[in-house]
Amino acid sequence: MQLKKMAVVFTCLLLVASLLAGCDGSQSGSQSLPTIRFLADDSEAAKKYAQGLQEIFRQALGIELVLENVDFATRLQKMRDGDFDLVFAGWGADYNDPLSFLELWVTDGPYNDVGWSNAEFDELISIARSSTDQEERMEALAKAEKILLDEAPIIPVYWRQRNYAEHPWVKGIIRSAVFPANEWKWAYTEGRPGGDNVLNLNLGEEPPDLQSITCTDAVSMDILNATLEGLVRMNANGEYEQGSGLAESWTISDDGLVYTFELKEGLKWSNGEPLTAHDFEYAWKKVVDPRTASQYNYMMFFVKGAEAVANVEIPDKESDPEGYEQAMAELQEAMDNMGVKALDDLTLEVTLEAPSAFFLSLTAFSPYFPLNQAAHEQWGEEYATEPDKMLYCGPFVIDEWKHGSKMVLKKNPNYWDADNVKLEQINLDMIKDINTPVTMYEAKELDVIGVPGDFIPKFQAERPDEFKQMPEAITFYLECNLNHPLLKDQRVRQALSLALDRQEYCDNVLRNYSAPAYAYNPPSISSEEPSVPFVEKYLNDYLPINGDVEKAREIFKAAVEALGYEAPELPTK
């Protein structure tokens, strides 16, 4: 999940103009360093975090990062378009497996914004996807991560810690290191001022995309998880069990390849129309349809034939009508062969490419949610852009949406488990600055908030029973666009990684108990031993958390001069 996944995700766009003051005279006729653009979000916290990186790189390597801040949705689009040189990005796990992080970087993958390619890495990811031997999978993934860290198309910075405050009347919110980050179905209040069963929260951002087949960010996914539902759903104990979602039960073939789901009887969309197995088949095929251009299409590749659908190339209909018709026939054939079939209104048969230990948990994830074909085709590109232009099948519906300001969710009377949904309404603000949510929380206008690093000591001292912490499966990292004349050089990227004192950054900039990332996968992701973190077993201390500035300077100077540029003078302080 991009964070957005964040994601779940916090990504930062810093526009970097390298003011390299001076030259040692040894490179007569060499050029000044080219400008490096560095993308950052426009929230108050994101600006602060970007400025911290700006100062670290200025002191270590003499490069000046010039910040340009844009809104969350714009930053996501710029990343998709490759319109950046350097971007501070975040990713949150969609499921508890290292593959959730590493498969982003396969050649030409939908999230591979940087243009990096490594055939050995791709082969290792292929092994991890298909192998049923967990030890073999983990060893392949560990080797793949080492390749990624060594070549440094991305540079891990920190693993995020969640810090939040919750008034004592708030009960039942389930929080998870992996999707869903926040489960509101089971939430309720006891003794809330102003009345129970209303919850006031701050989203912090406008949800960029509420189409389940294309959504990639954590903000939107919280809304989708509240208003839609998959075959399974995390229950009040944080587990997935039969009957927890829209499927009443399922069976799995002896070879682990065929799942047969029986849906609950009487399921309805929010407009009263029946919800059937055909809505799942339609949705899953739309995710991998190349015309959808979903960045999450690879999440469906566990299903037999899904990747073949995604790989169909469709030429322009106007310039190549014959080729277009051939491609459409090929696409239809691939869809017909895809391993998801509605056998009848209540029965969905799914055939996998290979057995998967975590496939059931994937069906709780937004790309696997059902989609009403008639409504989706009726509203087209406007689907899910307004409350009355989408259908709901989850615990809540969107009742009001003031774009950029506020969203109101209300209990869905057509939800199959409405009797167990206690909240009647969730009010969601979209406040970006740091201070306002804290003030509103203290005034009891917000029931739960994320606590910014600067306020943690205050909450620890004054509200110790309300302040809470938990580790997250989220990594923040720098992405280096390999089309840039400097960043295309592996030595330059390695120098950036070595120049970064991750511990200092966490201690003095973030100040929120986040941990310096000595690898890419965070400690919340398990190895083949569920109680042993993957990163601790296979990549312990792989990157120096305190950096190595002298070595970074040496590598950086040699690299830029070899490329024909002047090495920047280092600041006197």
Image (cartoon, rainbow, N blue to C red):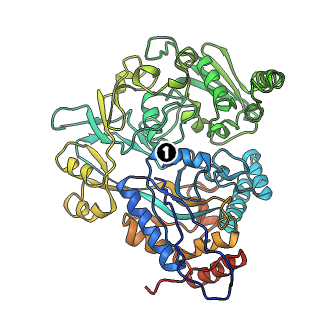
SS label for mark 1? helix
Does residue 146 sit above or below 380 in this rendering? below
Q: Position of residue 90 (x, y in %)?
A: 52, 54
Q: Look at the picture and state if 363 lies above or below 266.
A: below
Residue in the image at 71% along x and 51% along y: 106
Residue 327 image-quadrant placement: top right
Q: Amino acid at mark 1?
A: Thr
140 vs 399, nearest the viewer: 399
Q: Position of residue 431 (x, y in %)?
A: 31, 45
Q: Where is residue 363, by image quadrant?
A: top right
Q: Is residue 311 left or right of residue 8?
A: right
| Residue wearing tag 1 | 74
Q: Tell me the quadrant of the picture where the C terminus can be found.
A: bottom left
Q: Is residue 147 above or below residue 554?
A: above
Residue placed most toward the observer, 120 or 526:
120
Of all residues, the one furthest to the front in this rendering is: 29
Residue at position x 65%, y 61% in the image:
484
Q: Quadrant of the N terminus?
A: top right
From where the camera sits, is residue 6 visible? no
Could you say which is closer to the camera, residue 500 or residue 451? Answer: 500
Left or right of 268 on screen, residue 85: right
